[in-house]
Image (tube, helix red, strand yellow):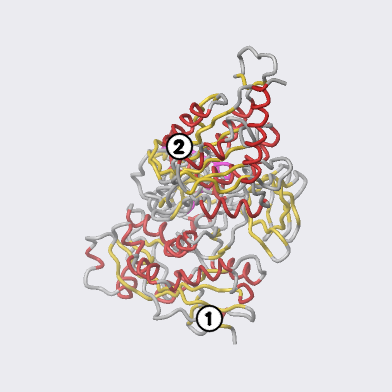
Amino acid sequence: MSTTRDTSIIAAIRQAARQEQFLDVLSRDEAEARFRAAVPHRPLPAETVALDDALGRVLAEDLSSPVDLPPFDRSSVDGFAVRAVDTLGAREGKPARLSLNSEVLACGVAPGLTVAPGTATAISTGGVVPRGADAVVMIEHTRFQEEEDGSGVVEIRRPVAAGGFIAFAGSDIARGETMMRAGTPISAREIGILAACGLAEVPVVRKPKVGILSTGDELAAPGSALPYGGIFDSNGAITAAAVAENGGEAVRFGIIRDDEAALSAAVERALSECDLVVLSGGTSKGAGDVSHRILDRLGNPGILVHGVALKPGKPLCIALIGETPIVVLPGFPTSAMFTFHEFVVPLVRALAGLPPRAENDVEAKLAVRAASELGRTEYVMVSLAEGPDGLVAFPLGRGSGSVTAFSQADGFLALDALSEGADAGTTHCVRLIGAHLRVPDLVIAGSHDIGLDAVVGRVIEQGFSARVLAIGSLGGLAAIRRGECDIAPAHLLDARTDTYNEPFLVPGLSLVPGWRRRQGVVFRKGDTRFEGRTAEEAMHALASDADSIMVNRNAGSGTRILTDRVLGEARPAGYANQPKSHNAVAAAVAQGRADWGVAIENVAQLYGLGFLPLADEHYDFFLREERRERPAVAAFLEALASAEVRGALREMGFTLPDAVRPQAAE
């Protein structure tokens, strides 16, 4: 053995001894805890991109809809716009005969004629519902007949209820409603929502730039000649693809030879250009042993972890240079990919604003019956929540014209063609839309209000995930009684006691005061019929005015109960027109399809309408006492009581009680 060779062997042994003294093997959990303590796993700052470039990105902030969807009351079928009362009693043997108006309302055509009693107007799917009409009859249930004088008559062979086959303004997305939350991955379905709302640019989380370096004299680039003893660099390609797959932007720095100066220069360049640097190879010996020669020298705090009790993956090295993390993966591909997915993927996804991975299929019980049309396989989109015995699936029923139902769905289940539906409580396999299901920490089901966005937003800022299911006050009360949600917002007025919400308490539930929503008459500013009158005076005066059309609310809503109480036996023109939201009422008035209605004050402000105050409505929260101590529930209650949220609610026009004191059932 030559002296030179002896010297080389001795140097290698000494180097290995120095490395062994440094190597401090940690458990996987200890290594992860040390990594997360030093490197914040949170989204990068926002940037604005064109809508066409938003696919695959992550929304950086909550977005409120600047418009109503649909923007007007529109027909959901081809047929005839009518007054529902004119179709009462219609049947095959004795059809209702209505005079046909001269205009045809195709998509994009503004109505010019009012549908007067005894008349009908031809309308296409998507057409604007004209003034005076409160329903649409399907063309299949009609027959056209031309009279001797050349006029047209439509025979109605089946009655239609008020609101039938009408998609009311804002019934899909209401102006001012939070349509998409920060942290939402933008897929084709979200692109559809953003485009439908007219947004050309989107605030998204900046993609993390991940520098990728492969080290080793033995490596050759794919496509090049492979020397004897060499291997193709697969780690660089796999790592770059995995980075892109998990929301990052891979920046390739190529293959770096086992030369300390060259490797040091490449690492420094990568650190200056990227948010995260990933190396493969060089964690154990030789010139590529960056753990000693380079990382500690480049800056503080330096090496965080060097050695993890994993098989494969023990040589993993993690460091932090200034504010930029650097991860050195083992050289063997299996070890490299195992440790990459265990330690690097969670950071890349967090920087990109993406949620953790999830499985593709789950089992869940239906919360309510899902109806199905016999003879067709039906796919029911569902939103998932945690129930007493596992996942609960809430069918989303906003209809085929909705662009939000698909966005809000976690997945779908299939109902057989020979089935007429699936009963509540039955278990189904739910195929997830995408692979990223995270059961929310907090489930809120009941009546929706834009003020709720301020509270939920604060909860999300605390690191909790939340899901809001707008299923109505009564639906939320039923869900919380079954244990399918944590909190149920409601504004239920008990007619016997003239009291909101409290009479509906049952053992196990308590009532947390929310805020007061001022209800009142909304009208177009400048309408002299409302000048100098109170809300009650205006309602009574206009109830007998045939030229004044009201827009009502759906039966069972708190607003409808209040309206009926004031009107008594009066039934003004338009009384049967009953959309299901305050926004739809305001839109009908603002767009001239109605002259007045009852809605909440902040919606009137959103639409620039006049407002005559009528009464204060209580919007409160039913709470399951057994879940009060859950962290996400506690965070909700803290947010509701916080000065910041209360101030935001006041700015929206709500009034609040002096303190949030839950009340239990007696």
Q: Distance between the residues labelled 2 and 1?
A: 60 Å
Residue indicated by mark 2: 271
Q: Which residue, as the protein is rendered here, is positioned at the far top? A: 225
Relative to the observer, which residue lies in front, 513 or 518? 513
Instruction: Give residue 291's position: percent from left, percent from top.
Output: 56, 40
The residue furthest front is 3
Q: In this view, does 418 lie above or below 537?
A: above
Q: Mark 1 points at which residue?
A: 502
Nearer to me, 203 or 554 = 203
Residue type at mark 1 is Glu
Asked if residue 622 is positioned above or below residue 378 in the image, the reply reads: below
Tell me the residue at 39%/35% (across/down): 50
The amino acid beneath tag 2 is Leu
SS of the residue under disc 2: helix
Highlighted range, magenta: 135-150
Question: Can the viewer see residue 122 in this picture?
Answer: no
User: Could you tell me residue 599's position as x and y percent?
Assistant: 38, 65
Looking at the rendered image, the disc whose residue lies closer to the viewer, 2 or 1, is 2
